[in-house]
Image: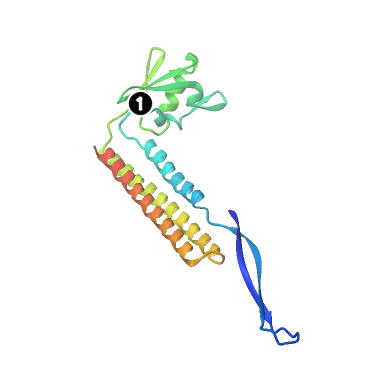
């Protein structure tokens, strides 16, 4: 929010009662009124940017049929009476587009890591190969592609909802500021908010279209 000073003028006057009935004297009293401006164009822009950045991150994690270390991010390894994140016990790398390699820091945990990946509900069947674990990534079925495409669409709608919410906040702030700013200035700012809204919705549509195309290829 921004503190803004608005200058207003008050006119006062009356007939001079002195001898000679001189013309009325008018004095302009100038005063400054302080108000808290709610609309911040830079902040609105940052919120729009964050919504698109968040969408990009979600879409990047949606991969199917291709080796990506993030596929194992949610794997928890049960050792004795505790559970550990896989990334705390091993390093995951890409061997080729269809295979992940898991290098466990302590060989004593190889079997536990293998079992945890197998039972993580990811439809993966790891293979212990000497001191490494190979994780073949199965080629996706049409059903799995369609499910992921649907998830992409749902995620996109959530992002558009965020954009609409940001727009509504901006318009409400401008309505508040209209009490102290000119109608022309408010109208100009409202137009800028709408332009940004259209721009970011278009960006979201393009990201979704590109992701669906990637999944279907």
Q: Is residue 13 left or right of residue 141?
A: right
Q: Residue at x 56, y 67 (%)?
A: 179
- Location of residue 132 by image quarter: top left
Q: Residue at x 31, y 46 (%)?
A: 206
Q: Which residue is mark 1?
A: 125
Location of residue 92 in the rendering, given as x and y in whole percent from the top left corner: 42, 23
Asked whether 209 or 18 is in front, the reply is: 18
Asked whether 191 or 46 is in front, the reply is: 191
Location of residue 102 in the rendering, given as x and y in whole percent from the top left corner: 41, 20
Location of residue 26 in the rendering, given as x and y in whole percent from the top left corner: 65, 77
Please tell me whether residue 193 is drawn above or below residue 139 in the rendered image. Answer: below
Asked whether 73 or 169 is in front, the reply is: 169
Q: Residue at x 39, y 22 (%)?
A: 93
Location of residue 129 in the rendering, given as x and y in whole percent from the top left corner: 37, 15
Residue neighbourhood size for the residue with mark 1, other residues' Cα within 10 Å, grouped as few (<14), some (14–19), many (≥20): some
Q: Is residue 54 left or right of residue 7?
A: left
């Amino acid at each position: 929010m921004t503190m803004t000073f608005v200058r207003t003028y008050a006119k006062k006057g009356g007939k001079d009662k002195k001898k000679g009935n001189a013309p009325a004297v008018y004095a302009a009293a100038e005063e400054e009124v302080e108000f808290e401006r709610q609309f911040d164009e830079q902040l609105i822009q940052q919120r729009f940017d964050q919504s698109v950045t968040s969408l990009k991150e979600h879409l990047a994690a949606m991969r199917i049929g291709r080796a990506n270390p993030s596929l194992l991010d949610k794997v928890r390894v049960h050792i004795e009476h505790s559970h550990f994140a896989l990334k705390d016990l091993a390093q995951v790398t890409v061997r080729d587009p269809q295979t992940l390699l898991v290098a466990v820091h302590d060989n004593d945990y190889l079997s536990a890591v293998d079992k945890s990946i197998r039972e993580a509900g990811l439809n993966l069947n790891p293979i212990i190969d000497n001191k490494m674990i190979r994780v073949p990534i199965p080629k996706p079925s049409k059903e799995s592609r369609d499910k992921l495409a649907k998830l992409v669409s749902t995620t996109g709608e959530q992002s558009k909802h965020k954009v609409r919410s940001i727009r509504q906040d901006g318009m409400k702030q401008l309505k508040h500021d209209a009490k102290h700013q000119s109608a022309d200035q408010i109208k100009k700012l409202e137009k800028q908010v709408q332009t940004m809204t259209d721009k970011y919705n278009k960006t979201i549509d393009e990201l979704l279209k590109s992701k669906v195309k990637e999944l279907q290829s």
